[in-house]
Image: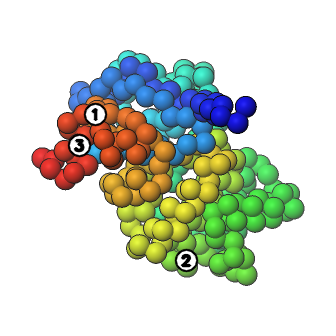
């Protein structure tokens, strides 16, 4: 029937009763949220409110911090508890890619930057690598700009191009999820617009979670927005609702700039 509602998208990431600590200091309190496949979820909130901490928990990057530990609760990706002791973190990070605040291309050629993860997996067949480079650079909207200089250093690119190169590198291992920690904070408005267009086009194939301090950016790129304050999830809803008619007074105060 023409008027049937589309099926709701499946939760790909589920956070349940989740507490997290750095040493004795609790950083996240009782977080409960779902992030659905092929949607962009934005985390907003003031500095130090737990947005990036939670993002890094989703691919266990916080394992690299010696004093970091879970209190209680769990995070599931595709129905599996990612903090189960049997989980292979390398496999997890292949499925859950990460793009950082500051672009971090390796001091290698553009070509070698893109296929770095494939080389680590032992993939060296030239035709496979060539195909991956073209596919991922096209996916990151960078192919037309660099296709004639794949042997030049990734460090020779502009800041915005470097960030898109890092996105191409994350795509090469064919993840299900892309985590982006303030991917545009160091970029000018033109480069920011290109990355935002890219996020919009990638969500048809990936589930994306983005931390941003830029509320206009959250409004432009995300389907759902989650507002955090002091390590707690205050409100999460469709982005239009969060920005037009938030249910929580703290959310409204933050959105309208009356916060503090």
* Residue 135, image x, y percentages: 75, 61
Mark 2–mark 3 contact, CB under 8 Å? no
Q: CA distance from mark 2 to mark 3?
A: 40 Å
Left or right: where 207 falls relative to 67: right
Instruction: Name the secondary structure under disc 2.
Output: loop
In the rendered structure, which disc, 1 or 3, sits on the residue that comes first in sequence?
1
* Residue 94, image x, y percentages: 64, 42
Quadrant of the image occupied by residue 30: top left
Q: Is residue 117 above or below residue 192?
A: above
Instruction: Name the secondary structure under disc 1.
Output: loop
Viewer-nearest of discs 2 and 1: 1
Viewer-nearest of discs 2 and 3: 3
- What residue is pinned by disc 2? 157
Mark 1–mark 3 contact, CB under 8 Å? no
Question: Which one is nearer the viewer's eye here, 222 or 5?
Answer: 5
Answer few, some or many: residues within 10 Å of disc 1's Cα (few below 14, many 20 plus, some between 14 and 19): some
Using the image, tell me which numbered label, if any, was put on residue 252.
3
Left or right: where 52 falls relative to 156: left
């Amino acid at each position: 029937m023409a008027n049937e509602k589309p099926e709701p998208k499946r939760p790909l990431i589920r956070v349940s009763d989740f507490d997290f600590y750095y040493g004795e200091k609790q950083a996240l309190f009782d977080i409960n949220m779902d992030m659905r496949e092929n949607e962009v979820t934005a985390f907003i909130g003031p500095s130090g409110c737990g947005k990036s901490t939670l993002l890094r928990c989703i691919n266990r990057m916080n394992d690299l911090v010696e004093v970091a530990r879970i209190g209680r609760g769990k995070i599931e990706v595709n129905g599996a508890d990612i903090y189960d002791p049997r989980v292979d973190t390398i496999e997890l990070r292949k499925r859950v890619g990460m793009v950082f605040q500051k672009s971090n291309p390796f001091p290698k050629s553009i070509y070698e930057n893109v296929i770095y993860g494939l080389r680590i997996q032992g993939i060296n067949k030239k035709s496979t690598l060539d195909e991956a480079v073209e596919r991922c650079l096209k996916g990151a909207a960078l192919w037309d700009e660099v296709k004639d200089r794949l042997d030049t250093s990734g460090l020779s690119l502009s800041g915005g191009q470097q960030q898109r190169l890092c996105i191409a590198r994350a795509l090469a291992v064919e993840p299900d999820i892309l985590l982006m920690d303030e991917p545009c904070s160091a970029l000018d408005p033109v480069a920011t617009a290109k990355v935002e267009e890219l996020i919009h086009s990638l969500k048809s194939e990936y589930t994306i979670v983005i931390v941003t301090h830029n509320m206009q950016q959250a409004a432009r790129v995300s389907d759902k927005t989650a507002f955090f304050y002091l390590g707690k999830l205050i409100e999460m809803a469709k982005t239009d609702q969060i920005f037009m008619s938030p249910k929580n007074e703290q959310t409204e105060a933050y959105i309208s700039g009356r916060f503090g």
